[in-house]
Structures are given as C-alpha cells and as structure tokens.
C-alpha cells in the first residue's frame, strides 16, 4: 500500500495467505496445497503473472455473474442467468482457493505500486469470500429490500436494447427463469432446514412483492418494458416477431415462476420465519455479525465500540440541530420537528416537483466541482423515479451506476411513494450524497481509471463508498450551500440518521433489541418521516452491518483529512486531497489511511494518478 515500501505488502500478503488457509478449512472444502516457494523471476515476469491472474479472475466473474456483466455493458452473457445452486456456490469457493494460491506464490517485492495494491486487494476479497462462506448467506436470498425477486425485474432497465440480438438474448434469458427459480427455492428450503431464515414479518413483505409481480399481465409487467420503445434500426417484421416471443416468454416462463415462488413462500417459507429480528438468532449469529461489522467498516471495531460512537455522534448532531431550531424560534427539537412536518412549504406538491428539486441542487453543485477536484468524471447523470413495484419498501433514494462506456448514464432513483409526505429539508443532502460530489462522481471516476485491473474499477467497500457519500453531504456546507436553514437542518438530520444507524444496527443485532426499540430510538432522536423510519429499520434487519459503513467511513475520511491538513499546513490543497482519496478506486479504510499517509510523507501535492 503504499506506505513505506514493499516489506509491508509482503508481510500483509503472508498474513492473508495464512488467513486464507484457515478460511478454506472453515468452508469444509478440501484446502489447497500450501504455496510452493516463488520461483526466481524478474519483476516484469512476476508483474505479468499477476496481470494474468487479475484478468482470469475478472473473466471468471463475468462468466459466472452474467447479470452483473450485462449491467457493465458486457454483452457476451446477455442470454444467461446466474447458477444459484449449492453446487455453484461450492464451485465458486474452489475457484477462489485456486486464485488465492496463485497470488500467494508470487513475490510482490519490487513490483509497481499499483500492481502490489491490486494483488493485496484481490487477495483480501478472496479471503473474505472464503471466511464468509461458513455463514451461508446464499440460503437467505430473499428480502424486501434487495432480494432476487426484485433484482431480476430491476435488471431490465439496465440492459441495452439496440439490436435484434439484444432482444433475442433477453428472450432466451427469460426462458431460463424457471430453472433459476427452482434453484432459488432449493436454497430457501436448505435455509429452512438449517434455521437460516429472515424474520416472519419480513417474509410477509416479500410475499406481497412477489404477488404484485406474479399477478400482472405480461404486457403490464416490468419484463415487457423493452417493447415500449424499439430502436429505429429494427424493422416492423422483427418488431412483430420479437413482441410475440417476448410476451410469450413472460407469460409462460417468468410469471408462472413468480407464481410458483409465491406459493412456496406462503406455504413453506413464511411458517418457518424466525421471531427475533436480530441475526444473533441465526446459527453462529454473533460470529456472523462480527464478520459483517469487519466487512462493512474494514476497521477493527466491535459492536460495543460502534454503539458508543453512535451515541456520541447523535449527541453532537443534536447540539447543532438545536442551535438551528432556536435561531428559527423553537425551544426544542421536538417542537421544531413537528412544525417541519406540518409546514406545507417543506413538502413537495407532487412527485415531479420532488424530482425537479433534486435536479436543481445537482445543477448548482456541478458548477462548483472544479473548486474541489482536480479530476472530474465524463459520465452523465440523470434523475429518475424508483420502480413502482419496489418503492414501498425502498430507501428515499439510491444511486445506480452507469456503464463504463457512458452509454447508460448514472442514475439517482428517487422514491415517490407518498411523495407529498416526504420532507424537502433532506433533499439537498441526499442529492450531494447520491449524485455529485458523492456516489456518481466517485464511482464514475473509478470506472474511468486506466492502467489498473477491471476488478479495481468495480470494487465496492461500504465504508469507503458510503462514507464518501456522507462526507460529500458535508462538502456542500463547506463551499457555501445549504443557505436555507431548513435545508441545513436537513443536512444534520441526514447525518444524525447515519449516527442513529450505528446505535440501532448494533442494538438489534448485538444487544437483542426489538424492532420497536429501533423505531422508538429513531423517533426519540429525529423527526425523520414515518415512511422512511419504517423502511429503514427493516433494511437494517435484513442487511446486518451494512448501515454501519456510512458514518464509520465518513469519520475515517474526516480523520485522515485533519491529519493531512495538520501535517501539510499551507501545502494542503483540498483538490489534491480529494484526488488522492479517489485516485485508486474504492479501498478498505485501513488501506486508504496508508495511501493518505504516503501522500503526506511525499509532501502533498498532486498525486500520480492511476489514470
């Protein structure tokens, strides 16, 4: 990493190798043989060998994750669906063992900085996969927030439909849904057999979602969306044939699969749902949550420490929020929150008005970006609505990355469910988080890197990516935005939202809180609208630890920035710092700190970009 030479890389690779062998043993698979001593080879030969590994890994991933490949604009597997069978899970772990061994056999001493970093990052990912295998997350593939029953229709909007082959590949893919859903139900049944099931009330939500899709006609379903607008290059005869074939595939393959899944969920899965919301109730639940904390935060913090950090951050935010409330004539946060909810000017008049507000904030921020960054992305950004079939249980907004070639823009999806009940106070902060300078800028810059392996361009670490998003909300304040005090209050409310997450996520999964305790803590420490509170607590229930990354990541970025400002003094430039933080793509937070430390040691200044 790029700290002080190659010895730290070599030491970490050795440690990762030892962890890998332990993790492989935990999976129950036959462990790979210990790496043989590295053969004497020139730095160029060793770097070339690693480049082959990086390429092989990426090609394997594209092959075995065809839906992901399609979202990136790789059309080679557009007629395929992922194999969800237990055999496929084991095969993936075995492939991972081989890659771990191949990387571990290569001495990285003396290799280029980015090559060494790539080797370490890939090895870390592979080891996490092996270690996490013991918790069998694949046995719980359905939830109300991002379950596979939702991922499949959401995929449609991310696919290109430019040629006849694009449509024919899509039709072939739809015909494979019955086989894949059979695998899905096998996974669910194995989860029931081993006691790995979501809470019953979550399954009830899933059942409603499945039925909402299963009960549609082929013409009205999201799967028929590509028929609504054909490209001009496709003629009338092809359009007629494609329409008939696609609707037939939806009618005979897709919708019956959803209907069968719905019956299985109602008859076999729902009765097995667990009572308690926390993952401590699962087999190895406490160990699983500890793993998820480390995976999400990429820090050495336990649940108790994070819980206390959350309480401290909630108190700090409340102090700043109270100052704004008092300036506006309110004695306390509760009275201000009640007035905010009752003020019609602080709620959109319609869904379209809400979308327009987001677009206005993003337009103003776009002009300011050169003051904050030396390098800006080329990828376009658009604001769209969350699909109606998913909006009830979705977050207020989320980002969906575009394709690396820019043909599909990045998208901020805005939830218009009960749109007129939504608070306008939070819109500015969300726009900066999900769009610019948040997710769209960071992810697009990563995708546009050159000279690094493809997997680096698509890497995701919750604390880094979501921490950057939350840090970006704060950046708007630094450059003079949030002029409306209600919007500034919304910024702090967005921040306290993430602080509350540290408390309630650890509360439910480590301290055995009930769902009502989670809701009550939200109400006691925020005026976040009821629709968001209800969907958010259920999100934390089904995604243990994920919500911790936001605040923990933001705090780490602020920490390393403060360190750099102090060390560099007048040499510190915010554009240089941001280019360093974003210049290597997504990183674990401990790695990011080492990158920043190395930059400080060099005396600051512009980084030598990987692209």
Image (spheres, rainbow, N blue to C red):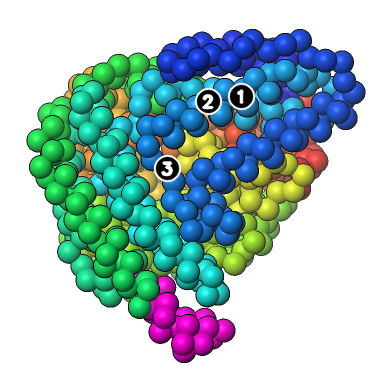
How many neighbours does mark 2 have within 10 angstroms: few (below 14), some (14-19), or many (20 or more)? Answer: some
Is residue 238 found inside the magenta-colored segment of the image? yes
Is residue 560 found inside the magenta-colored segment of the image? no
How many neighbours does mark 3 have within 10 angstroms: few (below 14), some (14-19), or many (20 or more)? Answer: some
Q: Quadrant of residue 271 in the image?
A: top left
Q: Residue at x 28, y 57 (%)?
A: 390
What residue sits right under mark 2 in the picture?
94
What residue sits right under mark 3 in the picture?
83
Front-lying residue, 1 or 288: 288
Q: Is residue 596 above or below residue 134?
A: below
Describe residue 475's horizontal placement relative to residue 89 as left or right: right
> Residue 21 appears at what percent x and percent y?
55, 12
Front-lying residue, 44 or 514: 44
- Please identify the dominant SS of the magenta region: helix
Q: Looking at the image, how many numbered discs can be counted on the residues?
A: 3
Q: Disc 2 and disc 1: Cα gap in Å?
A: 7 Å
Magenta extent: 224-243
């Amino acid at each position: 990493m790029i700290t002080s030479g190659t010895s730290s890389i070599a030491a970490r690779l050795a440690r990762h190798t030892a962890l890998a062998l332990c993790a492989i043993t935990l999976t129950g698979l036959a462990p790979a043989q210990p790496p043989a001593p590295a053969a004497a080879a020139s730095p160029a030969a060793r770097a070339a060998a690693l480049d082959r590994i990086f390429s092989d890994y990426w090609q394997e991933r594209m092959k075995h994750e065809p839906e992901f490949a399609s979202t990136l604009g790789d059309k080679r597997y557009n007629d395929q669906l992922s194999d969800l069978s237990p055999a496929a899970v084991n095969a993936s772990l075995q492939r991972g063992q081989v890659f771990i061994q191949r990387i571990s056999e290569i001495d990285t001493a003396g290799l280029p900085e980015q090559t060494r970093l790539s080797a370490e990052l890939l090895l870390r990912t592979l080891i996490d996969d092996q270690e996490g295998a013991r918790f069998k997350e694949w046995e719980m593939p359905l939830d109300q927030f991002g379950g596979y029953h939702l991922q499949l229709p959401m995929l449609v909007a991310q696919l290109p439909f430019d040629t006849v082959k694009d449509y024919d590949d899509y039709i072939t893919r739809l015909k494979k849904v019955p086989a894949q859903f059979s695998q899905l139900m096998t996974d669910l049944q194995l989860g029931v057999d081993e006691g790995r099931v979501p809470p019953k009330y979550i399954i009830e939500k899933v059942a409603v979602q499945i039925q909402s899709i299963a009960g549609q006609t082929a013409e009205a379903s999201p799967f028929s969306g590509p028929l609504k607008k054909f490209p001009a290059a496709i003629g009338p005869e092809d359009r007629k044939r494609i329409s008939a074939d696609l609707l037939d595939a939806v009618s005979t393959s897709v919708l019956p699969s959803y209907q069968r899944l719905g019956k299985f969920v109602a008859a076999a899965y729902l009765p097995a749902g667990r009572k308690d919301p926390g993952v401590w109730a699962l087999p190895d639940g406490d160990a699983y949550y500890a793993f998820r904390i480390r995976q999400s935060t990429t820090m050495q913090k336990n649940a108790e420490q994070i819980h206390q950090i959350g309480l401290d951050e909630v108190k700090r935010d409340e102090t700043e929020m109270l100052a704004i409330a008092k300036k506006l004539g309110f004695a306390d946060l509760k009275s201000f929150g009640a007035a905010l909810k009752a003020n019609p000017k602080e709620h959109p008049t319609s869904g379209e008005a809400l979308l327009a507000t987001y677009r206005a904030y993003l337009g103003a921020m776009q002009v300011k970006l050169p003051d904050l960054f030396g390098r800006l992305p080329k990828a376009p950004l658009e604001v769209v609505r969350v699909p109606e079939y998913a909006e009830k249980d979705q977050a207020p907004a989320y980002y969906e990355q575009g394709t690396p070639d820019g043909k599909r823009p990045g998208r901020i999806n805005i939830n218009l469910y009960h749109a007129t009940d939504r608070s306008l106070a939070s819109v500015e902060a969300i726009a900066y988080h999900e769009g610019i300078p948040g997710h769209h800028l960071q992810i697009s810059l990563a995708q546009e890197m050159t000279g690094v392996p493809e997997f680096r361009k698509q890497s995701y670490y919750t604390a880094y990516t979501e921490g950057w998003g939350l840090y970006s909300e704060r950046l708007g304040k630094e450059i003079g935005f949030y002029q409306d005090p209600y919007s500034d209050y919304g910024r702090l409310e967005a921040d306290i939202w993430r602080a509350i997450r540290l408390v309630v996520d650890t509360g439910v999964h480590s301290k055995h809180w009930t769902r009502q305790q989670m809701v009550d803590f939200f109400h006691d420490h925020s005026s976040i609208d009821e629709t968001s509170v209800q969907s958010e607590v259920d999100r934390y229930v089904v995604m243990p630890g994920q919500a911790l990354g936001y605040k923990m990541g933001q705090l780490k970025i602020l920490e390393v920035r403060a360190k750099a400002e102090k060390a560099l003094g007048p040499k510190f430039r915010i554009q240089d710092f941001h280019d360093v933080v974003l210049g290597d793509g997504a990183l674990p937070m401990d790695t990011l700190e080492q990158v920043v430390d190395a930059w400080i040691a060099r005396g600051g200044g512009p980084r030598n970009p990987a692209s």
